């Protein structure tokens, strides 16, 4: 393999930096999209994943679409009107992820398109293994990125966790 001269390496580094600078400059102004299409990108926000006949009203949207991204609001692990017993963290995780799956599918996406999952859980030390047991099987490889945060309480007594996500639409 032929060794490169110092000048060749420096020129290559300068061109990479120029490309990076141009890309970063375009991020704030939609420059890359404008260059490709002649139009600036601006985020749009619309309710998505609604049930038939459901209206986007209230103080919280269950799912918002902006471009090809979906932002799903926090889904509790237990809703008393849906299931009599609260169950453990495994039962609650399966319930929350099943609801997430329904919302994503109504919005034109799927669990395979989930990029990031956030979990808020009461007493993570005691509920960690059960939470993971309920989580398994919902996502294919590569699994989405995930953050888990311990919390002191949830809105509903007996509720052990809440899950939200960011996904994309093909």
Image: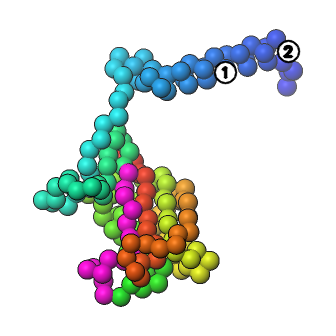
Q: Specify the label residue 64 is tagged with.
A: none
Q: Residue at 37% across / 58% down in the picture? A: 73
Image coordinates of residue 83 in percent, x first then y, are 30, 83
Say left or right for 67 vs 134. Answer: left
Residue sitting nearer the eye, 26 or 150: 150
Q: Is the residue 89 above or below the residue 168 in the image? A: below
Q: Is the residue 165 above or below the residue 75 in the image? A: above
Q: Is the residue 117 above or below the residue 87 in the image? A: above
At numbered mark 2, what does the secondary structure look like: helix, strand or loop?
helix
Residue hosting label 2: 6
Q: Which residues are magenta?
A: 71-84
Residue 37 visible to an observer of this rendering: no
Residue 40 visible to an observer of this rendering: yes
Count of numbered badges drawn on the protein = 2
At numbered mark 1, what does the secondary structure look like: helix, strand or loop?
helix
Q: Is residue 133 magenta?
A: no
Q: Is the residue 34 above or below the residue 85 in the image? A: above
Instruction: Identify the image quadrant of the C terminus.
Output: top left
Q: Is residue 79 magenta?
A: yes
Q: Specify the label residue 16 is tagged with.
A: 1
The furthest residue to the bottom: 85
Say left or right for 4 vs 131. Answer: right
Q: Residue at 49% across / 22% down in the picture? A: 26
Residue sitting nearer the eye, 165 or 102: 165
Instruction: Identify the image quadrant of the N terminus.
Output: top right
The furthest residue to the left: 53
Q: Earlier in the sequence, mark 2 or mark 1?
A: 2
Q: Residue at 49% across / 65% down in the picture? A: 119
Quadrant of the rendered image containing residue 51: bottom left
Image coordinates of residue 68 in percent, x first then y, are 36, 42
């Amino acid at each position: 393999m032929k060794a490169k001269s110092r000048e060749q390496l420096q020129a290559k580094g300068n061109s990479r930096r120029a490309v990076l600078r141009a890309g970063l400059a375009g991020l704030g102004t939609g420059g890359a999209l404008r260059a490709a299409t002649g139009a600036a990108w601006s985020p749009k926000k619309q309710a998505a994943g609604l049930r038939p006949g459901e209206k986007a009203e209230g103080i919280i949207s269950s799912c918002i679409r902006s471009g090809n991204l979906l932002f799903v609001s926090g889904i509790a692990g237990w809703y008393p009107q849906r299931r009599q017993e609260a169950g453990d963290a495994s039962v609650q995780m399966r319930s929350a992820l099943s609801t997430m799956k329904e919302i994503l599918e109504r919005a034109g996406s799927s669990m395979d398109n989930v990029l990031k999952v956030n979990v808020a859980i009461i007493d993570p030390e005691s509920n960690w293994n059960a939470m993971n047991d309920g989580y398994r099987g919902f996502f294919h490889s590569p699994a989405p990125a995930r953050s888990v945060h311990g919390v002191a309480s949830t809105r509903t007594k007996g509720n052990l966790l809440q899950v939200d996500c960011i996904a994309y639409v093909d």
